[in-house]
Amino acid sequence: MRAVLLLDERILSDGTHAKSWATATGAHLHLRDDDGTEGELSVAAVDRVMSRYGRALDPAIPVTGDVLELAGGFRLRRLRYHAPVDAEARDYLLWERPGEEPLCVVATMATAALRYLVLRLAAERPQETET
């Protein structure tokens, strides 16, 4: 059985709820969305997204939550945290890299970037009718 990590939950324009999920498949992260978006990204691509948008996690915040183990010792974790300045707790994705401090990104933002890459890669692939 493969581990599945919930990345994000959101409400669509028609009022329905949609979720984005990730699984580890070898050296790739497989992204699946309730709206039908599906594809794989390399761990290197995920690292670029998380490094671009991520910020260091305050050492006082406990590292908890569901985790997805990826190739090369990388981990993707979903963390719920209620900062004193926020009215409600927020969901974050925590990117744990071997030998480096973890990076934290608001889950909605990181998932949107990962979904964009999956959609972009799918658009660049030749369709079955084109081959």
Image (tube, helix red, strand yellow):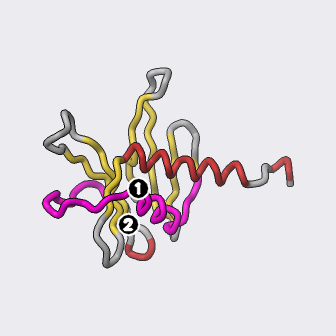
Helix, strand or loop at label 1? It is helix
Q: Is residue 118 visible?
A: yes
Crowd band around label 2 with a 10 angstrom C-alpha radius: few (<14), some (14–19), many (20+)? some
In the rendered image, which quarter contains the C terminus?
Answer: bottom right
In the rendered image, which quarter contains the N terminus?
Answer: bottom left
Contact, CB < 8 Å: mark 1 with mark 2? no
Residue 76 point in image, percent of width and height:
37, 61
Residue 24 point in image, percent of width and height:
46, 62
Figure check: 16 above or below 37? above
Identify the residue at image location x=19%, y=33%: 87
Q: Is residue 1 visible?
A: no
Q: Is residue 52 magenta?
A: yes
What are the residue bounds of the magenta stretch?
Answer: 39-67
Identify the residue at image location x=41%, y=34%: 10
Q: Is residue 120 magenta?
A: no
Residue 41 point in image, percent of width and height:
55, 60
Q: Determine the CA span between mark 1 and mark 2.
A: 20 Å
Q: Which amino acid type corresponds to the residue marked 1 in the rendered image?
A: Tyr
- Numbered badge on residue 11: none
Q: Which amino acid type corresponds to the residue marked 2 in the rendered image?
A: Glu
Identify the residue at image location x=26%, y=42%: 90
Q: Is residue 38 left or right of residue 48?
A: right
* Of pointers 1 and 2, the one earlier in the residue sequence: 1
Name the residue at the top extreme.
14
Which of discs 1 and 2 lies nearer the camera? The answer is: 1
Helix, strand or loop at label 2? It is strand
Count of marks, rendered view: 2
- Numbered badge on residue 69: 2
- Numbered badge on residue 53: 1
Figure check: 8 above or below 117? above
Q: Is residue 101 left or right of residue 6?
A: left
Q: Is residue 62 left or right of residue 17?
A: left
